[in-house]
Amino acid sequence: RDEIQSLIQNQQLLVERFVALNANHNQVQLLIETFSNKVFQTSQEFRDKLLNQEELQALSPLKTGAGLAALNTRLALLHDINDTM
């Protein structure tokens, strides 16, 4: 649980860094395209479930795998932005 909180905080710091940038038009477009990716909503929903004991226990292995994949994809997208900017 502490590890999940740490990952959430690290991703939040990356997002805040991008928002604080003096971005040009192309960078803004990249941010909009990236943050509108469905994986951001999916990963947020999964993170919320991980932090709720009842919902965590109800997660099937299939949904857990899909949630972890969404978190990994989200992180990869954030790293791509970081590398591009």
Image (cartoon, rainbow, N blue to C red):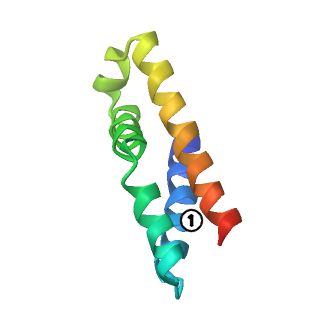
Position of 62 compared to 41: left or right? right
Q: Amino acid at mark 1?
A: Leu
Please tell me whether residue 17 is drawn above or below residue 65 in the rendered image.
Answer: below
User: Is disc 1 placed on a helix, strand or loop?
Assistant: helix
Residue at the spot 40% in from the left edge and 18% down from the top edge: 63
Q: Nearer the viewer, residue 7 or 75?
A: 75
The x and y percentages for residue 59 are 36, 17
The x and y percentages for residue 3 are 59, 42
Residue at the spot 65% in from the left edge and 56% down from the top edge: 79
Is disc 1 surrounded by few (<14), some (14 to 19) or many (20+) residues within 10 Å? Answer: some
Residue farthest along the bottom direction in this orientation: 22
Please tell me whether residue 41 is drawn above or below residue 17 in the rendered image.
Answer: above
Residue at the spot 52% in from the left edge and 83% down from the top edge: 23
The x and y percentages for residue 54 are 29, 24
Q: Quadrant of residue 36?
A: bottom left
Residue at the spot 39% in from the left edge and 11% down from the top edge: 60
Q: Determine which residue is flagged by label 1.
A: 14
Q: Nearer the viewer, residue 36 or 46?
A: 36
Residue farthest along the front direction in this orientation: 26
